[in-house]
Amino acid sequence: MTMPFENYTIKDIAKALNLSPSTVSRALRDSYEISTETKKLVIAYAEKINYRVNPIARSLKERKSYSLGIIVSEIANNFFSQVIDGIESIAYDKNYQVVISQTRESADRERLNVEHFYSRSMDGLLMALSSETTDIQYLQNLTEKGFPIVFFDRVPSEIQAHKVTIDNRMGAYQAVDYLQKSGKKRIGHLTSAEHLSITKERLSGYKTGLLAGGLDFDPKLVKYCKYGGLHQDEINQAVAELIEQDIDGIFISGDKLTTGYLLAIKQNQEYLQLNIEVAGFTNSKVVSLFTPEISTVRQPAFEIGKRAAELLIGQIESKHREEAYEHIILGTEFIAK
Amino acid sequence: MTMPFENYTIKDIAKALNLSPSTVSRALRDSYEISTETKKLVIAYAEKINYRVNPIARSLKERKSYSLGIIVSEIANNFFSQVIDGIESIAYDKNYQVVISQTRESADRERLNVEHFYSRSMDGLLMALSSETTDIQYLQNLTEKGFPIVFFDRVPSEIQAHKVTIDNRMGAYQAVDYLQKSGKKRIGHLTSAEHLSITKERLSGYKTGLLAGGLDFDPKLVKYCKYGGLHQDEINQAVAELIEQDIDGIFISGDKLTTGYLLAIKQNQEYLQLNIEVAGFTNSKVVSLFTPEISTVRQPAFEIGKRAAELLIGQIESKHREEAYEHIILGTEFIAK
DNA sequence: CTGAAAGCGCTAACAC
DNA sequence: GTGTTAGCGCTTTCAG
């Protein structure tokens, strides 16, 4: 039974075949300078002994690690885990490794992760900002230095970089419009940290939706969750406050927030009996099992991941500095209950 | 505004302070050979210019990457994502980076991932076998060679290595005992690939549970899903077959399988009206929202991750080859509906 | 077409 | 206590 792979080096091959390491290196990389025969010889022998390049050595030399860093708030999140799947599908094809890290919505951890990735010679980053992040100067510096970062979902408007988002306004509008057309008059809005791009855009869509139904916007019906629903406590608190406002419908602006809201309602029989109609962003695959039933705004999460990864790898592999950055905006899908 | 970090090297520091690179290196690593003054000087300057070691160079030299590989079938799985959180909590403290990859229950992809990690100089691996895996010889070779691998959840009985699992028999027994005590007479069992450790152990607990209620074991009431519920099709198929057997209760042996079963039932009004009582393994945080209500067996997923990571890092950092391997077995929690 | 040699950034004998 | 040197495995000028 042969070992799966021994730690052979280029030198071993060179010695065995009476060639120089450089020739072997070139042969393995299919350089035009090497004769077909030598190539065949080298490749055959390399296969026989199951030679693998040492990626660490290669990275050191080439200053390229063939690794992409992903930074999200949490992987145990339907939306993010689907985005990651999309990223991986592309990375896998193009022979990039993917490294995932979580911020848990902490700006400090986010910065640590970014620095860690940067100093670990990641070739580029894919990230959605944490809900706590306000200071993005360091990211700005990094991108200006030429370090490739593609932002998705929660993107910084101030930074010039490739971005992939969805039409948040439209997604929000459709949800609120549905609630409004269902006869709801006091439609609350449960959302994430106030300063985030997605929060602003969805709020804007919410307002348009109200307007379409001739409803007035009332700031008291909007509750922000600083940690984007990462902590159930903040959701419970926000829900209690919204209920005091006698809402009859609610538009919820995030995966964790939507399930968190339902959990909060379920814990309290009185809340449950109010029959508040729910429309929320979520990419959960088990929404149809939920009681009460809810309407949902679904994001093309896998596609977002794919497009973001394509942009990133494109940027990494392009010789020149990008002069124009793309901002891809995808559509959402509204599914009435 | 200063840059977050320039690419300074030890040489730069050495030059600036009129020292040799080795002195700087030693000072930074707090070597006993270096005078306190020099250390202070070096550290202060390093901080000033925001110096970071190049981990690639260090890895090449030390043959250690401070990275752990995690291999699971899917991260969009409540159980696995919680395990990963546990692993990260330890890795983060001990300054290891964590790299995650998915097999999607494919033995081929699993092998590719393992080889990839191995050749990428991961210091060790944490893995749960894919449902498709039967040939584990290559893993055997790797561990025998001294490459640290800690297995969790789905573990290979034949390989000598640290393992972290739960008391699958007891978990299954409690679930089936509950169903039986609720008066169910024909209790089906929906489970994963037949050869997996968890499948065998949970089947054994299922049998004991039946016995406790004076019920006979009927192989026709057991349905295996080769891909562990990764594909809804195979679940639908299995559910249809079980229903034909007139079951009045069901014990389900996995996270995806449990939600998949509920989705299958929900799609079909007739199925739903049979009111089959459900007890299943799942670590979903939104079980309480599900209709029909179900009883669950919960695994201490976070703890599993922590313990596995501790074992792995311990093995990596121990000078000698482990002579005795630990098998940690944790308890489950049964939550009646 | 192939080889010799330098060097990526870091560490660690081995000197002094 | 500090410096010199070699070398981790690889790629890539530069020579031939």
Image: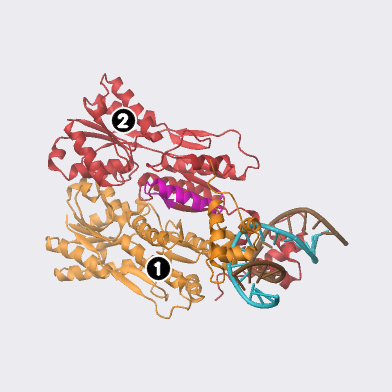
Chain colours: A orange, B red, C brown, D cyan
Please name the amino acid that badge 1 sits on.
Phe
Is residue B301 rendered magenta in the image? no
Chain identifier of the residue bearing label 1 in the image: A
Q: Residue furthest front?
A: A37
Please tell me if label 2 and label 1 are on a single chain.
no
Toward the top, the furthest residue is B214
Quadrant of residue A54 in the image? Answer: bottom right
Identify the element where label 1 is drawn.
strand
Q: Residue at x 22, y 46 (%)?
A: A289
Q: Measured from the top left, where is residue A178 in percent x and y?
A: 16, 62
Name the residue: 42% across, 64% down: A127
Tell whether A79 sits left or right of A247. right
Q: In which quarter of the image is residue A252?
A: bottom left
Residue B107 x %, y %: 40, 45
D16 in relation to A10, above or below? below
Which dot marks residue B175? 2
Determine whether label 2 and label 1 are within 8 Å by CB. no
Tell me the magenta residue range: B101-123
- Look at the picture and state if A88 lies above or below B235: below
Is A278 placed left or right of B88 in the picture? Answer: left
Disc number for residue A151: 1
Which part of the image, by quadrant, shows the C terminus of chain A? bottom left
Q: What residue is at 27 percent from the left and 23 percent from the top? A: B217
Closer to us: D8 or B330: D8
Q: Does residue A119 show up? A: no
Residue B116 among those drawn in magenta: yes
User: The numbered mark 2 sits on a residue in which chain?
Assistant: B
Which residue is at the front of the view, A23 or B192?
A23
Distance between the alpha carbons at the discs numbered 2 and 1: 45 Å
Q: Is residue A246 visible?
A: yes
Residue B203's x, y, as percent?
34, 29
